[in-house]
């Protein structure tokens, strides 16, 4: 009974092997015994030592089957590569290192020449080394943060874009470095096949993949345009993006700027209604290094409205405030002009409210204006026919305002003509002095 139990695994193993052999023969294959016989016969024909063939052996390793295939190829062509013995394997290699000697196919007899001095002279080797070193220097692809490169966009995803810049590995442009525009859709900004300029930026991970930025390039170009407009003191159009208690955030050339509340020229509620709309603005401060851009809508309106003003012209206005130093007059230009106490009358005036009150409509002459600062100075003193008319009879001054303003302009023009004539005579006299000396 015990012997029967021990013999059961052996019968099961023999049964499985028999079944596999039957399946192999049914498929048209060879049995393991025939494979071993063929291996031994092939080794004998190739002149290789063959292991004694054991009849009934049912296993063959992969190494034995590999030797069989190698031996058949060697018997057929004489070499492992299938070419005739002595034939050049690679013409370029033969030209560089000399023709290979005949090889019988035995690995023990295979030798490779490693001494290059036997193939070429030392002078030629040194010349080739120098040429190779010069090529390495000429085509050095060491990129550092701050370098500008022209890259080709290979692919675009949600997290960023892969860019080919000529480095060992393609660079990566993160989504937040794709553009100065506040857009989360990278695919709308960068597209595969697009060529554009990038700047290499530091990588926090420290890997071999470089990080590049298109936002920095766009920002530098935008700041160049803004600085040109700032130097020319140009009135620009900006778009309101957000309004807070301190003022409004605006956009100019895809750059973010700020308009303080005091320079909005409107209340905050009206400014919120204009979110997304454009309005004119004038530069107060622009600095590319600190990325600071401050503008004024009020000064832009002043400059546009002051263009209609002319020194010596008469304008109408309404007194809106009276102070000890003068009166503020509303000209309908979104800013108030100042009528200083010293410009009200030729006679001495102690209190402004003795002559002017809030709500009075007056006529005054433009004495000066500063478009950049948004200031206009008025005068009624220049319109008096006799000193003290503003104190005694202001209506008389307002009735004769155009006439007195015309006379004032004539006097100013005559004075300017005299000044130009005297300057021309002084210049002519200076030019005659060297001629007489010669």
Image (spheres, helix red, strand yellow):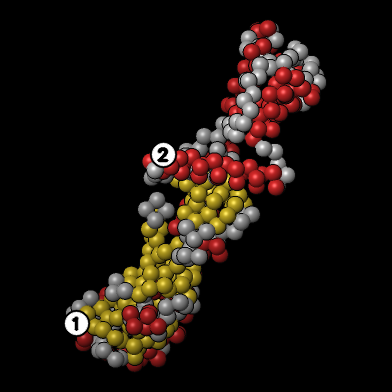
Could you say which disc has been placed on residue 3 in the image?
Answer: 2
Q: Distance of mark 1 from mark 2, alpha carbons?
A: 138 Å
Q: Is residue 43 above or below residue 204?
A: above
Residue 112's place in the image compared with 423, above or below, is: above
Task: Name the residue at 58% across, 55% down.
Answer: 155
At a point 65% along the width and 26% down the height, the residue shown is 67
Give the image quarter of residue 95. top right
**Towards the viewer: 309 or 234:** 234
**209 w.r.t. 352: above or below:** above
Q: Which numbered marker is on residue 351?
A: 1
Left or right: residue 77 compared with residue 388:
right
Q: Quadrant of residue 295?
A: bottom left
Quarter of the rendering occupied by the N terminus: top left
Classify 10 Å Cα crowding around label 2: few (below 14), some (14-19), many (20 and above): few
Give SS at disc 1: loop
- The x and y percentages for residue 264 are 36, 75
Q: Position of residue 114 (x, y in %)?
A: 63, 12
The C terminus - image quarter: top right
Residue nearer the viewer, 106 or 295 = 106
Placement of 175 over or under 172, stated as above or below:
below
Residue at the spot 41% in from the left edge and 39% down from the top edge: 3
**Circles 1 and 2: CB distance less than 8 Å?**
no
User: Between tags 1 and 2, which lies in front?
Assistant: 2
Residue at 49% in and 70% down: 237
Residue 120 spot, x, y in % from top left? 70, 10
Direction from residue 374 to residue 253 in the image, left or right = right
Residue 340, quarter of the rendered image: bottom left
Secondary structure, mark 2, is helix
């Amino acid at each position: 009974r015990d012997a029967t139990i021990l013999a059961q695994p052996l019968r099961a193993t023999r049964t499985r092997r028999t079944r596999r052999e039957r399946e192999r023969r049914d498929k048209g294959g060879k049995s393991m015994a025939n494979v071993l016989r063929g291996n031994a016969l092939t080794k004998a024909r190739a002149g290789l030592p063959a292991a004694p063939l054991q009849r009934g052996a049912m296993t063959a390793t992969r190494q034995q089957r590999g030797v069989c295939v190698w031996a058949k190829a060697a018997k057929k062509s004489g070499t492992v590569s299938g070419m005739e013995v002595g034939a050049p394997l690679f013409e370029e290699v033969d030209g560089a290192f000399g023709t290979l000697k005949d090889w019988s196919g035995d690995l023990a007899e295979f030798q490779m020449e490693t001494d290059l001095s036997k193939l070429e002279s030392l002078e030629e080797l040194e010349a080739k080394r120098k040429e190779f070193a010069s090529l390495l220097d000429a085509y050095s692809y060491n990129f550092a943060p701050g370098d500008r490169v022209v890259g080709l966009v290979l692919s675009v995803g949600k997290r960023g874009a892969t860019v080919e810049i000529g480095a060992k590995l393609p660079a990566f442009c993160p989504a937040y470095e794709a553009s100065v525009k506040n857009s989360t859709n990278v695919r709308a900004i960068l597209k595969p096949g697009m060529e554009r300029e990038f700047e290499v930026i530091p990588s926090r991970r420290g890997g071999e993949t470089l990080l590049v930025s298109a936002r920095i390039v766009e920002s530098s170009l935008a700041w160049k345009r803004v600085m040109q407009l700032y130097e020319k003191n140009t009135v620009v159009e900006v778009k309101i993006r957000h309004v807070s208690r301190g003022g409004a955030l605006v956009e100019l050339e895809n750059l973010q700027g700020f308009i303080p509340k005091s320079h909005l020229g409107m209340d905050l509620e009206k400014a919120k209604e204009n979110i997304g709309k454009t309005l004119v603005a004038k530069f107060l401060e622009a600095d590319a290094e600190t990325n600071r851009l401050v503008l004024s809508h009020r000064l832009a309106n002043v400059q546009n409205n002051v263009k209609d003003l002319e020194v010596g012209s008469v304008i109408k206005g309404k007194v809106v405030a009276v102070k000890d130093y003068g009166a503020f007059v509303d000209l309908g230009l979104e800013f108030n002009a100042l009528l200083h106490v010293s410009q009200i009358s030729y006679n001495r005036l102690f209190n402004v409210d003795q002559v002017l009150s809030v709500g009075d409509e007056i006529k005054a002459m433009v004495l000066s204006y500063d478009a950049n600062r948004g200031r206009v100075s008025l005068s009624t003193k220049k319109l008096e026919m006799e000193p003290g008319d503003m104190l005694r009879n202001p209506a008389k001054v307002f009735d004769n305002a155009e006439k007195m303003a015309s006379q004032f302009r004539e006097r100013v023009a005559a004075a300017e003509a005299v000044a130009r004539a005297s300057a021309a005579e002084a210049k002519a006299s200076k030019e005659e002095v060297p001629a007489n000396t010669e």
